[in-house]
Image: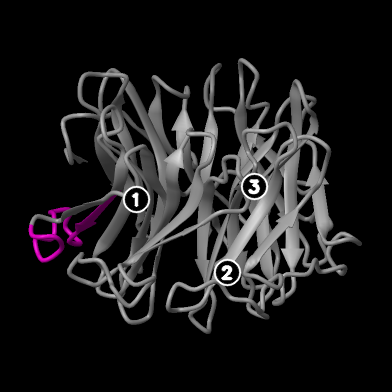
Amino acid sequence: MTTDVTPSGDFAADLAIQADGKIVVVGGASWDKNPRFALLRYNADGTLDTTFGGDGKVTTNFTRREDAAWGVAIQSDGKILAAGDAALRTGNSRFAVARYNSDGTLDSTFGGDGKVTTEFTRADDPVAGIALQADGKIVVSGGAAWNTLHANFALARYNTDGSLDAAFGGDGRVTTSFTRGRDFANEVVVQGDGKLVAGGYASYSRTNGRSRFALARYNADGTLDMTFGGDGKVTTNFTRRNDVVLDLALQPDAKIVAAGISASDGSNSKFGLARYNADGMLDASFSGDGKVQTDFIAGYDQAEAVMVQPDGVIVVGGATAGFGGRFVVARYDTGGALDSTFNAGGIATTNFTRHDDFAFGLALQTDGNVVLAGGSGWRGSNPKVALARYFGS
């Protein structure tokens, strides 16, 4: 199904499922004219929930420039957190977080007006991921000085009222450098012991990329965890081109699954998955060397989101044939092979339009069904938010 938020280009970047089964989607609205945060809430049957914003849709401006939400998290009290960018591509963008009450109104107990922005540098500091700690504190990941030749992983942690948590990095902010090039944290997850794992990419060339999967693990105070990779950081090559982590998932046994793109700058990129043991070493029980690449078509395939089922089976969502392609969901068994019991081959794809359809977010329902969210008809006349649901068995 598709949903029009504005007539000027809308998309979904992430989604989460509430305890009552309702589906919350975040992304961008009016991307061609006045970009802003977009939130939508659907009932379990896919209809818009009119108790949210009056018509199931809410938009929020942080600035007069490009604002968009890339991550969502739902608190135990039902309040909704959206994290993204304020003033993207202005040369001085900032981390942006908004909190909403269950009816879609901004929660004024968060930052005074429901919105918080955080600056790391005077360059672009964009956001990509969000996670909630068990104590309710909010962790957001992205990049510091992303539009420069030496960008770093950036994490911020907020107290429940939206103030920066000074117990994290001394002022609520932490940056990590992997290389002399551009490093960026696309996602962050919270382990059961409270440690944080951030995943993204580390670029080993300032001019032509050559990035690798990059993971960093942090102690609760924001210091690097030296039991992970020896110095708190791990990088993994799939190819000699750009390899990028776009999402992370934690298994019940504390192993870490990273999903993204191998050879993202090539003509035939693939889904890239890697699984790591708790110490940061690649898990050789996963496809023999800890790494899996999946090629759907001779073109651009990208894994955008990953989750682990309670039985350890791994579900990955993204796009195949890239822009101009289709939604795709793939399911892998615990050893890294495609699960042939899922859609008789381990893969399911969906077309919405003849234009660009792409999935960014993935969620698992309690019945095992899989929901993907993204955009349909991009580069067409009126791109829309798009959702698809797949039977889990």
- Drawn side of residue 314 relative to residue 221, left or right: left
Position above or below: 175 against 278:
above
Q: Which residue is most to the front?
A: 122
In front of the other: 367 or 358: 358
For disc 2, the neighbor class at 10 Å (few under 14, some 14 to 19, many from 20) is many
The residue depicted at 13 percent of the width and 54 percent of the height is 48
Drawn side of residue 315 relative to residue 37, left or right: right
Q: Quadrant of the C terminus?
A: bottom left
* Residue type marked 3: Ala
Q: Are marks 1 and 2 in contact (CB under 8 Å)?
A: no
Q: Which residue position holds label 2?
A: 157
Q: Is-magenta flag for residue 39?
A: yes
* CA distance separating discs 3 and 2: 15 Å
Q: Amino acid at mark 1?
A: Phe
Label 3: which secondary element = strand
| Label 3 vs 2, first from the N-terminus | 3
Disc 2 residue type (three-letter): Arg
Residue at (76, 21) in percent of width and height? 207
Whether residue 15 is situated above or below residue 113 in the rendered picture: above
Quickly name the residue at label 1: 62
Range shown magenta: 38-54
Q: Give the mark nearest the N terminus, 1 or 2.
A: 1
**Residue 288 location, x and y as percent?**
80, 47
The numbered mark at residue 144 is 3
- Distance from label 1 to label 3 (Cα)? 19 Å
Farthest residue toward the bottom?
A: 135
Residue 118 position, x and y percent, is 52, 58
| Count of residue discs | 3
Residue at image coords 54%, 67%: 311
Q: Residue furthest right?
A: 230
Element under disc 2: strand
Tell me residue 202's x, y (percent): 75, 40
